[in-house]
Image: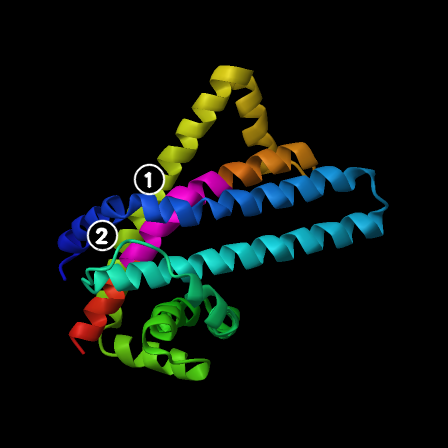
């Protein structure tokens, strides 16, 4: 579909299912809070214990985030197909598809990373070519390398059209996320003072020493932004995917 129609229809679907999205994506804040808590508690531990505790917390947070993204994909795919079912996430999909989803994500990441190592442009080319492996897995049941091949077959011959739509929707989401982050900083500044907000920004950009409390605040802020905008990213991704399937 044309870029303008893609952006507007994706936004309408995002608004229509906002409650179901929020019920799922709030887990991003939970994952961020787990990482923050581990860093805060680990301050009093020996170095080895602190590292092990932090790694465990990050593994748990990653599992929560992965499960959430998988469930968001299933919901967005089902809703975009025009089914009349309620906007409720599938409980079963998280159990049956978690490890296949993780494996496809690893394969896709390795391929893109390999392209980036060879040269920057092959990495971009592969990221678009293999970018629909995850919805292929969830909707069509293709797993592993088969999912990557299916995504490549969908995009082949339409790479520039796919790249343009991915870039346009990505810029929209990035702009909204940046504005939301700025708003969060302004709200925080109203309570603690804008000078503290400037110190926070300076710490994020320039500090070489870790401060668990400040890191935790930044992590939770990122979790809030993810909670709002990851569902919109998934909706746009699904719409491009279905557009590729309909026109193949």
The residue pinned by badge 2 equals 10
- Magenta part of the protein: which range? 223-236
Residue in the picture at 43% in, 61% down: 91
* Residue 101 seen from this side: no
- Label 1: which secondary element: helix
Residue 120 in the image, given as x and y percentages of width and height: 45, 66
Residue in the picture at 61% in, 32% down: 203
Q: Which image quadrant for residue 226?
A: top left
Number of numbered labels in the structure image: 2
State how far apart marks 2 and 1 are (Cα). 14 Å
Residue 88 in the image, given as x and y percentages of width and height: 33, 54
The image quadrant where one finds the N terminus is bottom left
Residue 12 in the image, given as x and y percentages of width and height: 19, 47
Q: Which image quadrant for residue 5?
A: bottom left
Q: Which mark, by number, is residue 176?
A: 1
Q: Earlier in the sequence, mark 2 or mark 1?
A: 2
- Is residue 65 shown left or right of residue 178? right
- Dominant secondary structure (helix, strand or loop) of the stretch shown in magenta: helix
């Amino acid at each position: 579909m044309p870029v303008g129609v893609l952006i507007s229809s994706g936004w309408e679907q995002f608004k229509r299912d906002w409650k179901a999205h929020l019920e799922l994506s709030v887990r991003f804040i939970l994952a961020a809070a787990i990482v923050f808590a581990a860093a805060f508690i680990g301050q009093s531990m020996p170095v080895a214990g602190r590292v092990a505790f932090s790694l465990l917390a990050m593994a748990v947070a990653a599992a929560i985030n992965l499960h959430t993204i998988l469930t968001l994909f299933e919901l967005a795919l089902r809703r975009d197909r025009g089914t009349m079912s309620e906007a409720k996430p599938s409980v079963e999909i998280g159990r049956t598809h978690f490890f296949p989803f993780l494996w496809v994500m690893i394969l896709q990441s390795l391929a893109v990373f390999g392209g980036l190592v060879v040269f920057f442009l092959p990495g971009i080319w592969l990221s678009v070519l293999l970018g629909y492996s995850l919805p292929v897995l969830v909707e069509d049941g293709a797993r592993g390398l088969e999912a990557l091949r299916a995504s490549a077959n969908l995009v082949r011959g339409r790479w520039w059209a796919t790249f343009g739509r991915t870039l346009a929707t990505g810029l929209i989401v990035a702009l909204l996320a940046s504005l939301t982050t700025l708003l969060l900083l302004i709200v925080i500044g109203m309570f603690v003072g804008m000078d503290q907000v400037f110190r926070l920004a300076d710490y994020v950009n320039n500090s070489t020493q870790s401060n668990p409390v400040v890191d935790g605040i930044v992590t939770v802020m990122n979790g809030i932004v993810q909670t709002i905008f990851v569902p919109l990213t998934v909706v746009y991704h699904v719409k491009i995917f279905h557009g590729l399937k309909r026109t193949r």
